[in-house]
Structures are given as C-alpha cells and as structure tokens.
Image (tube, rainbow, N blue to C red):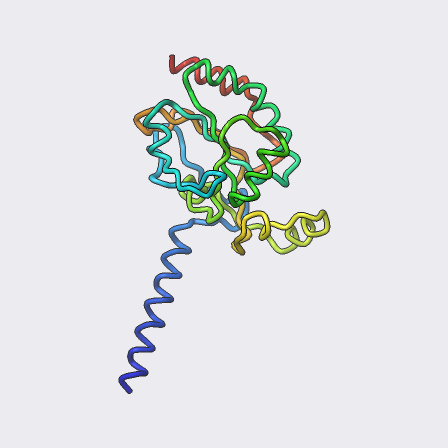
Amino acid sequence: MRNLTVWLLISFICVSLSTATAQELKIASDAKSTHPLKIGQPAPEVSFQDIAGKPVSLASLHAKLPIVLVFFRGGWCPFCTKHTQELIKAYPRIKEFGAELYGVSPDNPESSNANVDKNSIPFPILSDADVTAISAFGLAFEVDSDTLQRYTGFGIDLEKASGKTHHALPIPAVYIIDRSGKLVFAHSNPDYRQRLDTKTIIAELEKLK
C-alpha cells in the first residue's frame, strides 16, 4: 500500500510538472492565435545558446547596447534566408547606430552553425531549440500534422533541425530592445511570407539616437 501511495505521488508530481511546463511555454494552436509581446513591455528573462552550444542570456546582450532581435523559422526556410540576406546588407548600418543584431530560431546550435556557414551570416545566430524564449515572447505555435507532412515532402525535417519533438515554430518577428530591457519596437506577422523591411529597422534605430 505504501509503495502504491509513493507511486501515485510521483505520478502526480510528474503530471503537474508536465502541465506547468506546457502552460509556461504558451505554444499557440496556430500562427494566428499567438500573442506577441508589445512595445513598452519588458523583455523576458530568457536565455539562448550560441552556435558553440554555450548559454547566452538576453539580459547580458541588451545590457551592453541596444539590440535588434529577429525571430525566424530556421535555416531551412527560403523566406527566412531571403530576409537574412536583406539583414546582412543592413547590418553595417545597424552597427553604425550603436546596436547589435541577433537572429533567433528553433534550430539547434549545429543547425544554426550550418546556416551561418552556408549563408556567410556576419551577425550572431542564437539557438532556442526548446522554444522557451520564443514562447516567452508570445511567438510560438504548433505546426499541424498536415503541414508537417507537406514539409516532409519538401525534405524539411523540423525534428532534425531542432533536435526536439515539439513541432513548434515562431511567427516571424523583430524587436528592438534598449539597454534597460524595454521593448522599444515590436513587429510580428503570422504570415511567414511577409517580413519587415530593413529600412524600418534603421529608421527605428535612428529614433533612439
């Protein structure tokens, strides 16, 4: 009887932790159901991994200088790659305004490193394979089974890219965070085909000067 009681207690704790984790992640059922953070809100206290797998806290990044944080779906996404090329062109101007640019995706460090090498990306790419940061920004949604099957037909393997089985992606988003940790600019779009013009990023950085 005692063993049964202990087993039930352990099971309850495991279920409670699992439920808490699911609730904490805030993964929406679809892209249009996400609730992105807005201008004026504080940046969440989250961490990423760099391409070497080392932890990097968001606070340590914006404490040094204003940052532009660009959330994208992954190195496998052609729309993300196209936007990345535009960001690469804009990167020198972003640096001129005293800011740093960071890309964030659910790709694991290995996949992120491959993306950097393949596309000669000069700015840091950060990994959020567990989608904890993506979720904290209100950007995470679960890819439905039909879309997963379609991706598989295109040779896209989300589990291989992230090393996880959550099948979650971010809606594309761009945030500018000042040194105090406040979101001074926010843009997102559930339509992954639509990306923010880099001219807007430059214009917003100019306002901070």
Query: What residue do we see at 36% from left, 38% from top?
Result: 57
Q: Residue furthest bottom?
A: 1
The quadrant holding residue 4 is bottom left
Pick the front one: 166 or 115: 115
The quadrant holding residue 120 is top right
Query: What residue do we see at 57% from left, 28% from top?
Result: 121
Q: Is residue 152 above or below residue 182?
A: below
16 left or right, relative to 148:
left
Q: Is residue 147 above or below residue 103?
A: below
Q: Quadrant of the C terminus?
A: top left
Query: What residue do we see at 53% from left, 39% from top?
Result: 171
Q: Is residue 163 above or below residue 75?
A: below
Q: Position of residue 25 (x, y in %)?
A: 42, 50
Pick the front one: 141 or 209: 209
Q: Quadrant of the N terminus?
A: bottom left
The quadrant holding residue 21 is bottom left
16 left or right, relative to 110:
left
Q: Position of residue 24 (x, y in %)?
A: 38, 51
